[in-house]
């Protein structure tokens, strides 16, 4: 597993540094300048998805899996390393946005609880997106999944719009808090299920 | 004899192509060349041996045990080189070495890897996306050899390389085979490479094994007989293996018993048959 993580992080080293710089620039622009730190939490979470997507695109492009399956690496390990990379990317994004919140707190009044809740919520949603996308990436490859991704991102907004049109009342504060508390557990369960599904797909695609 | 690879009744079907009932072995201490025209099934055969595709039928033994593609331990003594390197583009030579060390752990010989890289003049700090095709192949070979495998499986490793690089690589394979426990299965359509180093030739045509023969038998016993129509009329069908009619008249025959044929037909011109020509006779020629 260490070998696979090393390979991905080393291969994406330059890309990750570029993402960090972009994140920092947006952080300064939107966050520290007007105190809108929740934007950075969401943006960092979205970029963590891009890290995973890019690592899989590189693997596909260079024929990595064919090569890796001639080495003493199990299929489960190859799939697992992508889920670990996803966790690290989301975790890294969360730490980054929390750090910006700390810096922002010198200039604006930032509620630590709110910063934690926003970052935690965005990270959990990013994990759920990764959990949805990764089996698709293993099944259909990066090109087709990029197209599906647009649909997957748009769907929740359409759903909210649809519910709004139905005239359903907005959830109460207690409900939102309850959802926020449940979110990490839901994300963990979906992530685990997604991993098992990806292993199955990968075994079917490459026996 | 102890075999490094034993394949029995391997079959795999695709729309428009099928690998049919393939059985052969690669004895330990030998270099076996797998030849055939494009689309003959060479890569499919290697993929099936390595468990990268699921054959409908057949079994594979590697290094004396039934190969289980789900068991990574079965791949610890095998080195594989494909025509594409398979390594991520932004890794440097040094990073590949480190990654492979983490994959093979105690089996990895970092000094050997550095030695191969020095020998092949491969830069350690250059990203492999900036490597030439030849450099990528050399790096793949260095990586495949540095955990001291007993079996090398190579899919067109010398394709698209210049003769100097090919010679360097063939020298390395010859050195590898000096240890008589080691073996190589080498798929290629550059048959001159095999004429230099192979012990045995497997010829695949349209997914079927046409022959498995010792290279020396092939080259020294086979010959191309170039005869006129009148000379051809005097030759019995059992005296040759395949024939090709020449556009300007006359016949070319692939002969399997060079000396006997020369004794019986001293007036017919007999030329040496290279592996390329033998292959051509089977692909383009007619049977008797």
Image (cartoon, rainbow, N blue to C red):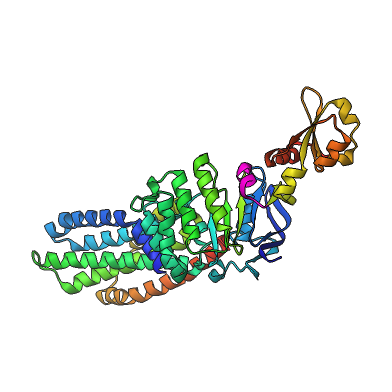
Q: Which quadrant of the rendered structure holds the N terminus of chain B?
A: bottom right
Quadrant housing residue A120: bottom left
Q: Is residue B74 left or right of residue A20?
A: right
Q: Residue at x 71, y 41 (%)?
A: B279
Q: Which one is nearer the viewer's eye here, A165 or B184?
A: B184
Q: Is residue B105 left or right of residue B56?
A: left
> Is A163 placed above or below B252 here?
below
Q: Is residue B192 magenta?
A: yes
Q: Is residue B224 left or right of residue A206?
A: right
Q: Can I make out residue A60 in this image?
A: no
> Is B86 placed above or below B253 here?
below
**Residue placed farthest to the left in the image?**
A107
Q: Which one is nearer the viewer's eye here, A25 or A107?
A: A25
Q: Position of residue A152 (x, y in %)?
A: 41, 58
Quadrant housing residue A29: bottom left
Q: Can I make out residue B87 in this image?
A: yes
Q: Which quadrant of the rendered structure holds the C terminus of chain B?
A: top right
Q: Is residue A146 magenta?
A: no
Q: Residue at x 49, y 44 (%)?
A: B165
Give, as a single range, the part of the protein colored magenta. B190-199
Q: Main secondary structure of the magenta part?
A: helix
Q: Is residue B139 left or right of residue B199?
A: left
Q: Position of residue B17 (x, y in %)?
A: 69, 48
Q: Residue at x 53, y 44 (%)?
A: B166
Q: Position of residue B106 (x, y in %)?
A: 45, 71
Q: Position of residue A166 (x, y in %)?
A: 36, 62
Give the tally of numbered discs. Answer: 0
Q: Which one is nearer the viewer's eye here, A205 or A121?
A: A205
């Amino acid at each position: 597993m260490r070998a696979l993580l090393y390979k991905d992080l080393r291969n994406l080293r330059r890309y990750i540094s570029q993402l960090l710089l972009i994140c920092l620039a947006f952080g300064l622009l939107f966050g520290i300048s007007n105190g809108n730190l929740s934007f950075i939490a969401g943006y960092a979470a979205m970029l963590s998805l891009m890290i995973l997507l890019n690592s899989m695109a590189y693997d596909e492009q260079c024929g990595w899996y064919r090569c890796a399956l001639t080495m003493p690496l199990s299929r489960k390990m190859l799939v697992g390393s992508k889920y670990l990379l996803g966790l690290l990317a989301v975790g890294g994004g969360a730490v980054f946005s929390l750090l910006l919140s700390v810096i922002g707190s010198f200039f604006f009044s930032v509620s630590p609880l709110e910063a934690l809740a926003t970052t935690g919520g965005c990270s959990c949603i990013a994990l759920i997106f990764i959990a949805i996308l990764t089996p698709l990436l293993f099944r259909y490859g990066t090109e087709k999944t990029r197209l599906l991704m647009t649909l997957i991102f748009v769907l929740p907004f359409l759903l909210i719009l649809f519910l709004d049109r139905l005239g359903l009342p907005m959830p109460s504060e207690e409900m939102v808090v309850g959802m926020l508390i449940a979110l990490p557990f839901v994300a963990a369960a979906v992530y685990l299920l997604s991993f098992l599904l990806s292993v199955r797909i990968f075994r079917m695609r490459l026996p | 004899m102890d075999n490094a690879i034993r394949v029995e009744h391997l079959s795999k079907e695709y729309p428009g192509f099928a690998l049919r009932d393939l059985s052969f072995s690669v004895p330990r201490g030998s270099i076996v060349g797998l030849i055939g025209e494009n689309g003959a099934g060479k890569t499919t055969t290697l993929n099936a041996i390595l468990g990268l595709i699921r054959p409908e039928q057949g079994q594979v033994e590697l290094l004396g045990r039934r190969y289980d593609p789900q068991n990574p331990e079965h791949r610890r003594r095998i080195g594989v080189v494909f025509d594409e390197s398979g390594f991520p583009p932004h890794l440097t030579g040094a990073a590949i070495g480190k990654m492979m060390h983490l994959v093979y752990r105690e089996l990895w010989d970092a000094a050997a890897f550095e030695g191969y890289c020095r020998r092949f003049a491969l830069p350690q700090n250059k990203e492999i996306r900036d490597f030439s095709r030849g450099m990528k192949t050399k790096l793949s070979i260095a990586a495949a050899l540095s955990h001291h495998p007993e079996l090398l499986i190579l899919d067109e490793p010398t394709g698209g390389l210049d003769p100097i690089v090919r010679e360097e690589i063939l020298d390395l394979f010859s050195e590898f085979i000096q240890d008589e426990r080691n073996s190589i299965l080498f798929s290629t359509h550059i048959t001159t490479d095999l004429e230099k180093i192979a012990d045995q030739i497997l010829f695949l045509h349209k997914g079927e094994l046409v022959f498995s023969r010792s290279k020396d038998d092939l080259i020294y016993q086979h010959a191309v007989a170039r005869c006129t129509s009148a000379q051809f009329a005097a030759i019995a069908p059992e005296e040759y293996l395949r024939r090709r009619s020449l556009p300007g008249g006359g016949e070319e025959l692939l002969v399997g018993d060079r000396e006997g044929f020369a004794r019986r037909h001293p007036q017919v011109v007999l030329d040496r048959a290279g592996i390329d020509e033998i292959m051509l006779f089977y692909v383009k020629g007619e049977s008797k």
